[in-house]
Image (cartoon, rainbow, N blue to C red):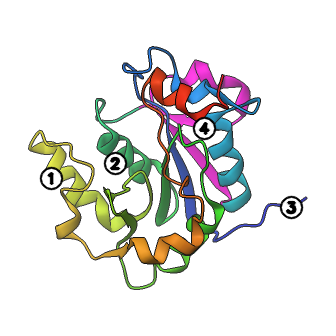
Amino acid sequence: MMPDFVADDITGVILVGGKSRRMGRDKAFLELRGKPLFERVLDLFRESFPKVLLVGDREERFADYSVRVLADLIPGSSLGGVYTGLSGADSDWIFVSSCDLPCPSKAILRHLCSLREGFDAVVPKTRQGYEPLFALYSKRCLEPIRKLLDRGECCAYAWYPDVNVREVGPDEIAPLDPDGTAFLNLNTPEDVRNTGGIT
């Protein structure tokens, strides 16, 4: 089956550089129904975008996946990973995801990509706040991110006031995420136990 690209000017970027300290082992390779979490995001991105990049300093860990791995230009934060992805992508836009989403949503991904005209970034905002690591960013975000990082700050969304962001709020997201799992995040062994389906 041929990939069903959402747009040929968007690169999928998966952040794989986290240390997984709270989990105690590499979250990217935790399995859900026999498939590592990372592969669930990779499959969605390969279906949706013509190019996929990984960002993180662990190229050897992903050698079997035939996908380009970029070393973090500014290690130590997810914002540095976003910056690296934007810097390394050939396209004007990147869609960023963390590597540990058990249920990455194709419906939400497509909706966010459809809204980018006239904006610099398209970001979900749930009732818990922004979801900056399942979001769409243009190259125009590079300079504001760089300025923040140069100040030693790494909040993933502190730079949003400096660009034109399309917020996609809870009421807009709800019909696309009826079971409320699209932004489920696994950080600790307790989170894993609570899912019941990850080994």
1 or 2: tag closer to the N-terminus: 2
23 is higher (above) or lower (below) than 137? above
Q: Do tag 3 and tag 4 residues touch (Cβ < 8 Å)?
A: no
Q: Distance between the residues labelled 3 and 4?
A: 21 Å
Q: Residue 147 carries which label?
A: 1
3 or 4: tag closer to the N-terminus: 3
- Identify the amino acid type marked 4: Arg
Residue carrying label 3: 2
- Identify the amino acid type marked 1: Lys
The segment highlighted magenta reads 49-71
Residue pictured at 68% horizontal, 59% vertical: 50
Query: How many numbered dots are placed on residues in this image?
Result: 4
In screen coordinates, is 46 left or right of 28? right
- Where disc 3 sits, the SS reads loop
Q: Quick one: quadrant of the N terminus?
A: bottom right
Q: Where is residue 165 in the image (x, y as percent from the top left)?
A: 31, 73
Q: Does the magenta stretch include residue 82?
A: no
Rendering quarter of residue 10: bottom right
1 or 3: tag closer to the N-terminus: 3
Q: Distance between the residues labelled 2 and 3?
A: 30 Å
Q: Do tag 2 and tag 3 residues touch (Cβ < 8 Å)?
A: no
